[in-house]
Image (cartoon, rainbow, N blue to C red):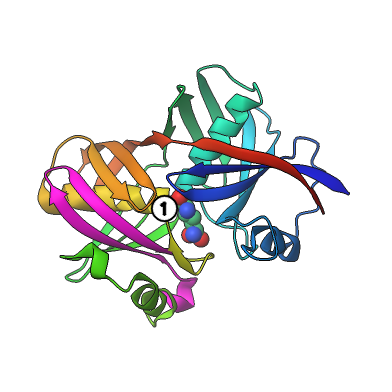
């Protein structure tokens, strides 16, 4: 059957978006992987279904580009909020449900401000930090981010003995640019490549830098695809709530595809 799809991007993390309020989209790993394929399909880092949900404006169902149902996606969350706004589902603020629980968000013409799930534990190691911001994230610091072999090193860690057997992890490389200012590059599990930006990854890097650098207040993060901001509250050491991922989310085009 012919299905209308939309393409959105948030700082270059791009998604096929489907209005599935009827619940009729024939989601299968094979179909989603083929739609996300950059040569044989539409091309995207992931696919998102917007569905109805009792008590919320909508439900976000996120799949990675490989067709596997993923954990939370921060940029995808910002994009689905923009999509819901474009569909007229809310005016200024919304609440929706995703795989990691409820989220709230506000939309202006340019910016989506998305409330992320609380983070209750940050593992600090000599070489890296690890936390779950809705998705699992390994965070490591580098001096020259431009020179990092993101895919080679990212793959080794994602499939390595520590994280591989437990389902893998996303791998973030961070360079401190200035006070409250980072540059981040991310190897994304489920895409199995570097993406232009990863929202849950950027969130993890900002919380890690807050702890390691002792910074207070919002942190600005440069990614390959643009700039994001992370704001947060730390009610107890190493525990975070009121975490917000803030940045642009844009509709690129719409079309029809046979599914
Ligand atoms: N791009 C996403 C992360 C997707 C998570 C996924 N790669 C996984 O952990 O399986 C983001 O903006 O947060």
Residue named by callout 1 = 198
> Would you say the magenta stretch is mainly helix, strand or loop?
strand
The residue drawn where x is 64% and y is 59% is 36
Asked whether 74 or 165 is in front, the reply is 74
What x and y, as percent, mark residue 123? 26, 61
Figure quadrant of residue 184: bottom left
Figure quadrant of residue 28: bottom right
**Is ligand 1 closer than 8 angstroms to the Cβ of mark 1?**
yes
Residue 141 visible: no
Tell whether 193 sits left or right of 44. Answer: left
- Tell me how many marks there are: 1
Figure quadrant of residue 43: bottom right
Tell whether 191 sits left or right of 246. Answer: right
Judged from the image, the secondary structure of the residue bearing numbered disc 1 is: loop
The residue drawn where x is 23% and y is 40% is 219
The residue drawn where x is 18% and y is 65% is 144
Magenta run includes residue 40: no
Magenta run includes residue 178: yes
Residue 29 visible: yes
Tell whether 242 sits left or right of 50. Answer: left
Tell whether 176 sits left or right of 104. Answer: left
| Mark 1 neighbour class, 10 Å CA radius: few under 14, some 14 to 19, many 20 or more | many
Compared to residue 44, the image places residue 181 above or below, namely above
The residue drawn where x is 79% and y is 41% is 23
- The magenta span reads 163-188
Compared to residue 71, the image places residue 76 above or below, namely above
What x and y, as percent, mark residue 25? 79, 47
Compared to residue 187, the image places residue 161 above or below, namely below
Residue at far top of view: 91
Compared to residue 151, the image places residue 178 above or below, namely above
């Amino acid at each position: 059957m012919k299905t209308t799809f939309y393409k959105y991007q948030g700082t270059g993390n791009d998604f096929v978006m489907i209005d599935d309020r009827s619940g009729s989209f024939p989601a299968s790993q094979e179909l989603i992987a083929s739609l996300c394929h950059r040569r044989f399909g539409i091309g995207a880092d992931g696919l998102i279904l917007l569905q109805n949900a009792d008590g919320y404006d909508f439900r976000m169902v996120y799949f990675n580009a490989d067709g596997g149902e993923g954990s939370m996606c921060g940029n995808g969350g910002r994009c689905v909020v923009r999509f819901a706004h474009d569909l007229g589902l809310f005016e200024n603020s919304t609440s929706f449900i995703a795989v990691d629980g409820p989220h709230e968000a506000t939309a202006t013409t340019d910016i989506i401000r998305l409330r992320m799930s609380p983070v209750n534990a940050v593992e600090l190691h000599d070489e890296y930090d690890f936390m779950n911001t809705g998705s699992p994230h390994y965070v490591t610091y580098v001096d020259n981010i431009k020179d990092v072999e993101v895919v080679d090193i990212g793959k080794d860690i994602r499939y390595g003995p520590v994280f591989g057997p437990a389902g893998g992890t996303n791998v973030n490389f961070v360079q401190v640019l200035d006070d409250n200012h980072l540059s981040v590059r991310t190897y994304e599990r489920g895409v199995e490549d570097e993406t232009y930006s990863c929202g849950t990854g950027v969130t993890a890097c900002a919380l890690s830098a807050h702890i390691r650098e002792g910074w207070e207040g919002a942190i600005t993060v440069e990614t390959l695809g643009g700039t994001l901001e992370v704001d947060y509250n730390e009610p107890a050491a190493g525990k975070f709530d009121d975490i917000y991922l803030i940045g642009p989310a844009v509709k690129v085009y719409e079309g029809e595809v046979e599914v």
